[in-house]
Amino acid sequence: MREFTKVSADCFHNQDDAEQVAGVRDFIWWTFDNPRLKFYWPNYEAAPWHIQCMIQLSGETVEMNFWPHKSKGQFKYEKAIEPLSAFIEELNTRLNDVEGDFDVVE
């Protein structure tokens, strides 16, 4: 496991593909806006395109998966949601359904 650096050059993407560059940029901005979430690469050497974090929702630990270059997010065991903005909207809906603050699992 490797902590997410929030550096574009460390993220897997094609620098010549404007959509991939924008996806990585938007994901990085979102991580800066959410410092309580601890993002990491579960296996950077084998899959530098895959980033994860854990969150508590309704008292349950939920693993979230991200593919920034594809602007895609997923709650573990659920269908992936594209684009990232739609995933964030779904996450916010789930957070708003939970009473009180949420705890981040590191």
Image: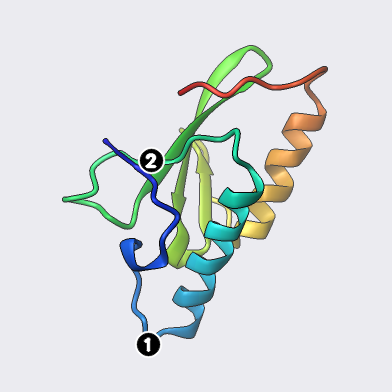
**Does residue 34 appear to the left or right of 61 in the view shown?**
right
| Image-quadrant location for residue 49 | bottom left
Tell me the tag on residue 16: 1
- Residue neighbourhood size for the residue with mark 1, other residues' Cα within 10 Å, grouped as few (<14), some (14–19), many (≥20): few
Asked if residue 42 lies left or right of residue 53, the reply is left
Q: Position of residue 25 (x, y in %)?
A: 53, 68
Q: Position of residue 60 (x, y in %)?
A: 58, 15
Name the image quarter holding the N terminus: top left
Q: Is residue 79 visible?
A: no
The crowding category of the residue bearing disc 2, from other C-alpha atoms within 10 Å (few below 14, some 14 to 19, many at least 20), is many
What residue do we see at 69% from left, 22% from top? 102
On the picture, is 92 further left or further right than 71? right
* Vertical arrangement, residue 37 with respect to residue 62, above or below: below
Gap in angstroms between the C-alphas marked 2 and 1: 25 Å
Residue 82, image quadrant: bottom right
Provide residue 92's location: percent of width, then percent of height. Answer: 75, 40
**Is residue 81 in view?**
yes
- The local secondary structure at tag 1 comes to loop
Instruction: Point out the residue furthest to the top here.
Output: 59
In this view, 91 is above or below 56: below
In this figure, which residue is indicated by the disc labeled 2? 40
Q: Look at label 1 and name its amino acid.
A: Asp
In the image, what residue occupies the spot 36% across and 81% down? 15
Quadrant containing the C terminus in the rendered view: top left
